[in-house]
Image (cartoon, grey):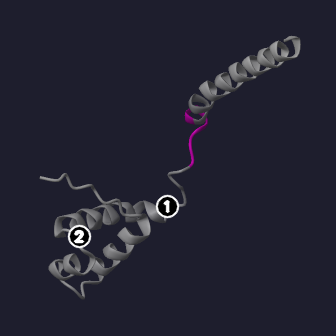
Amino acid sequence: MAKSTRRVHDAQFKSKVVLEALKGHKTLAQLSSDYGIHATQITTWKQQALEGLPTLFNGQTNSVLSAQDREEIEAPLFQQIGQLKVENDYLKKKLRTS
């Protein structure tokens, strides 16, 4: 038996399906048939959309990190940049002397 691969749907496709589901012009079975997605998946996306709606207009975005979160992410990256710079300088010196 062949193993089937999971399909990954982008946000635009999901929002299109959810919008159709919220309109209510078609049943879940019809949407499922039209888009080739299981009705349970459509229901899950619809629930996620409805849960996210209250935060949509609150004026804050989820993508903005707090200063502490940003520092936690940046600190190891700056450390790695410094280490790579030192290694690069060392290798340049070794190359000149060879």
Q: Answer few, some or many: residues within 10 Å of disc 1's Cα (few below 14, many 20 plus, some between 14 and 19).
A: few
Residue found 34% across the figure and 77% down from its top: 19
Residue with the most extreme bottom position = 25
Q: In the rendered structure, are the residues bearing label 2 and label 1 in contact, judged by CB atoms less than 8 Å apart?
A: no
* Mark identifier at residue 48: none
Q: Answer few, some or many: residues within 10 Å of disc 2's Cα (few below 14, many 20 plus, some between 14 and 19).
A: some
Q: Which residue is mark 2?
A: 37
Q: Is residue 50 above or below residue 70?
A: below
Magenta region, residue range: 64-69
Q: Is residue 45 above or below residue 96?
A: below
Residue with the most extreme front position = 98
Can residue 12 be found in the magenta stretch? no
Residue found 57% across the figure and 29% down from its top: 72
Tell me which corner region of the image, top left, top right, bottom left or bottom right, holds residue 51: bottom left
Compare marks 2 and 1 and give the one earlier in the sequence.
Answer: 2
- Image location (x, y in percent) of residue 22: 29, 78
| Front tag of 2 and 1 | 2
Foreground residue, 51 or 11?
11
Residue found 29% across the figure and 64% down from its top: 45
Helix, strand or loop at mark 1 = loop
- Image location (x, y in percent) of residue 53: 39, 65
How far apart, in angstroms, are the residues tagged by discs 2 and 1? 32 Å
Q: Which residue is mark 1?
A: 58
- Disc 2 marks a residue whose amino acid type is Ile
Residue found 88% across the figure and 16% down from its top: 96
- Disc 1 marks a residue whose amino acid type is Asn
- Image location (x, y in percent) of residue 30: 18, 83
